[in-house]
Image (tube, helix red, strand yellow):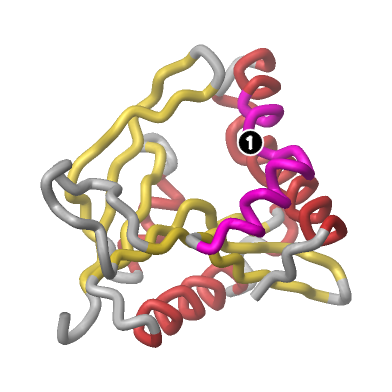
């Protein structure tokens, strides 16, 4: 779990910008990327996210360096009709691993940590959004039992993209 302090926020901002840029820069315009990064990954933004009680951050350090993290949101309404209550649903808002650590099992370790936390919290489901064109991420989530339940718009700068909403029900719930 992450500490809600300025050094952690700065590390999350740097890693979030780096991993998002590495993953999506080639398929988006520089202007759209710059706008998205500025809106979502400043140290002040990360500090506010760390301080929000609905958020949980799982951090992966290797050799005393932050190389991956997951941002989770309690009671997520992602993929639910407005009339349905989101209690008991955990959303994976971000699951980021630095390029040089991809393929090492670090992402899978983070996902196992997410699912273990969901069990501890007695969640009924874990949900997430993934870009429809991110085949690698979609295959990763499918290996963990996530299934598509819908889609929603994702705005990256001026570009409106489609994210698939995936869900994994938790055993016995």
On whether residue 140 falls in the magenta region, the answer is no
Q: How many marks?
A: 1
Q: Quadrant of residue 69?
A: bottom right
**Of the pair 11 and 27, the residue shown nearer to us:** 11
Q: Quadrant of the C terminus?
A: bottom left
Residue 22: % across, % down: 68, 39
Question: On the picture, is 74 further left or further right than 60?
Answer: left
SS at mark 1?
Answer: helix
Label 1: few (<14), some (14–19) or many (≥20) C-alpha neighbours in 10 Å: some
Residue 82: % across, % down: 17, 42
Residue 138: % across, % down: 37, 51
On whether residue 38 falls in the magenta region, the answer is yes
Residue 142: % across, % down: 31, 62
Name the residue rendered at 85%, 68% in the picture. 65
**Of the pair 68 and 103, the residue shown nearer to us:** 68
Name the residue rendered at 33%, 55% in the picture. 76
Label the magenta part by its dominant secondary structure.
helix
Name the residue rendered at 65%, 20% in the picture. 35
Name the residue rendered at 64%, 75% in the picture. 1
Q: Which residue is mark 1?
A: 40
Residue 116 against residue 137 in the figure, above or below: below
Residue 19 against residue 172 in the figure, above or below: above
What residue range appears in magenta? 36-53
Residue 144 against residue 171 in the figure, above or below: above
Question: On the picture, is 140 further left or further right than 13?
Answer: left
**Of the pair 76 and 37, the residue shown nearer to us:** 76
């Amino acid at each position: 779990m992450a500490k809600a302090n300025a050094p952690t926020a700065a590390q999350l901002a740097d890693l979030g910008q780096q991993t998002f840029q590495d993953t999506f820069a080639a398929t988006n315009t520089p202007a759209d990327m710059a706008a998205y990064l500025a809106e979502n990954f400043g140290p002040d933004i990360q500090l506010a996210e760390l301080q929000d009680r609905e958020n949980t951050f799982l951090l992966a350090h290797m050799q005393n360096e932050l190389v991956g993290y997951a941002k989770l949101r309690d009671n997520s309404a992602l993929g639910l009709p407005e009339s349905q209550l989101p209690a008991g649903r955990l959303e994976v808002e971000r699951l980021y691993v630095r390029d040089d650590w991809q393929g090492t099992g670090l992402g899978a370790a983070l996902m196992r940590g997410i699912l273990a936390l969901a069990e501890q919290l007695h969640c009924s489901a874990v949900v997430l959004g993934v870009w429809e064109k991110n085949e690698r991420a979609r295959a990763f989530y499918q290996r963990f039992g996530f299934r598509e339940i819908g889609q929603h718009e994702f705005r990256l700068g001026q570009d409106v993209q489609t994210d698939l909403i995936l869900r994994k029900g938790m055993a016995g719930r």
